Amino acid sequence: MAKNQPKAGQSPLIDNFRNILTDLTQNPYPYVENPPQCKKRASVALILRVRPHFDHPPPASTPLLDDTLSAPEQISKFFAQAWVNAGDPECIFIKRAARLGDRWTSHVALPGGKRDPEDEDDRATAIRETMEEIGLDLTEGSVISIGNLPERVISTTWGKVPLMVLCPFVFLYTRPDIPPVKLNPPEIASTHWVPLRVLLSPSVRTYEYVDVTDRFARHGGIVVKVLARSILGKMRFSAIRLIPSESVYCTSTVEFFSPPEAATQAPKTSIAARLYQRYLGDHAASADRSRPLLLWGLTLGILADFLDQLPPHSAVKLWSYPTFTTWDTRLIIHLLTINLKRRNLARLEGRNQTAIDSETEAVATSADNPWFIGGLSGGIKCKGKNAGKSYAVGVMLDGYYDMARRGAWITFFGRTVGSLVLVTYIVRRFVQWNH
């Protein structure tokens, strides 16, 4: 077993990992105000640990953090230990339970949720939600609160309606024996610790395919939706296939095990309903355990912000512009947006990148963002090199969705008109042939 593990002491990842954590403690990202008519805020927790290497076990007992030390000093003291330097840094993901009508059903995500009125601040929301969802106490004596990642305004993908401000926070466990997780059955189906070296590997990069025709063609009913799906296909989003080192499943959820008798007791659906689900259903949020764990959308964007700070600083390659699966739609959108993407990439030079999903996107908090009002946090000052930085999706996607939507409609009408012309031609030839 030991020979299959990465060799200890040969990877610079731990050194870079220490540096990025120290940097985050000293250079917080600015607070983002809520846009007008949007009062909701939410927080997520990026929880990190170092898994000990087989050849370098930790001591029988590890001391708690010294509260008299600053966060950078606590990090330095933690990484001075031999077992840490030889270890494998990891982060934890959750897979949300399947819930009817839930926007995030069965999605792979970070622990977190909406801010409650009693929460002291956004960080307190991340701590409370983590405790409620997976039972980890981020205030206990072995956890360092590292800092935050760029906050972002979440909006609907097509409508550009702001939904909430999403605030990611970073935490580091400094003990090798992390308390066992306690999964909340109504909310969480499973948790998965994934090594950072897996997330950085090009071999796990893939795509997620989502049916968005119900959001693209909101009017016209099933006929328009069937036509749109036939013409446009599904929408393709960049993703990472997760390979966990450790997984825990909530055994009381349907996703874990559904006995054969449950299938016989389930209400029967009509043939039309089954065909609808098979052809037009959105399988990206499927609760099927046989599907690979795919990290995509908003959570991929948060991870990209973090991973892009690790050498070789190429997390931008984790993400590509969303597009449709049919070749002509893809070609038209590419032709319409090629200059725009080049211009936006030039503006993005030296900044982090992100990802979006089928219903929502993250909007940068910059002058290019129509929801960003009155500067950073209404005058709240933030020191450090990240004080003027923000989430870069507003730059990457500035104008993209308008052009992509235009390209989709061009394809839709072009194919529809072409089909009508072809049918008319065939009918006329048939009539001529009979006469």
Image (cartoon, grey):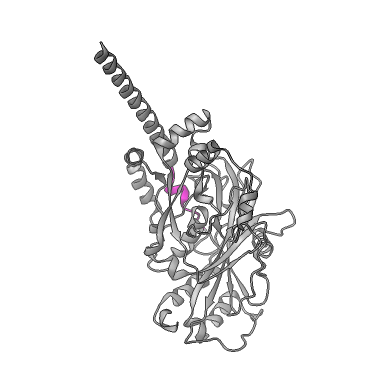
Q: Residue furthest bottom?
A: 60
As rendered, which of 41 and 175 lies closer to the eye? 175
Q: Position of residue 117 (x, y in %)?
A: 73, 53
Which residues are drawn in magenta? 388-398
Q: Position of residue 244 (x, y in %)?
A: 50, 68
- Describe residue 278's horizontal placement relative to residue 168 as left or right: left
Q: Could you tell me what secondary structure mostly forms the magenta stretch?
A: loop
- For the C terminus, which image quadrant? top left
Q: Where is residue 131 in the image (x, y as percent from the top left)?
A: 68, 65
The quadrant where residue 432 appears: top left
On whether residue 352 falls in the magenta region, the answer is no
- Residue 350: in sight, yes or no? no
- Describe residue 430's horizontal placement relative to residue 225 as left or right: left
As rendered, which of 183 and 307 lies closer to the eye? 183
Seen in the picture, residue 238 relative to 21 is either above or below; the reply is: above
Q: Position of residue 168 (x, y in %)?
A: 57, 59
As rendered, which of 226 and 89 lies closer to the eye? 226
- For the N terminus, which image quadrant? bottom left
Q: Residue furthest right?
A: 118
Seen in the picture, residue 221 relative to 31 is either above or below; the reply is: above
The quadrant where residue 255 appears: bottom right
On whether residue 390 falls in the magenta region, the answer is yes
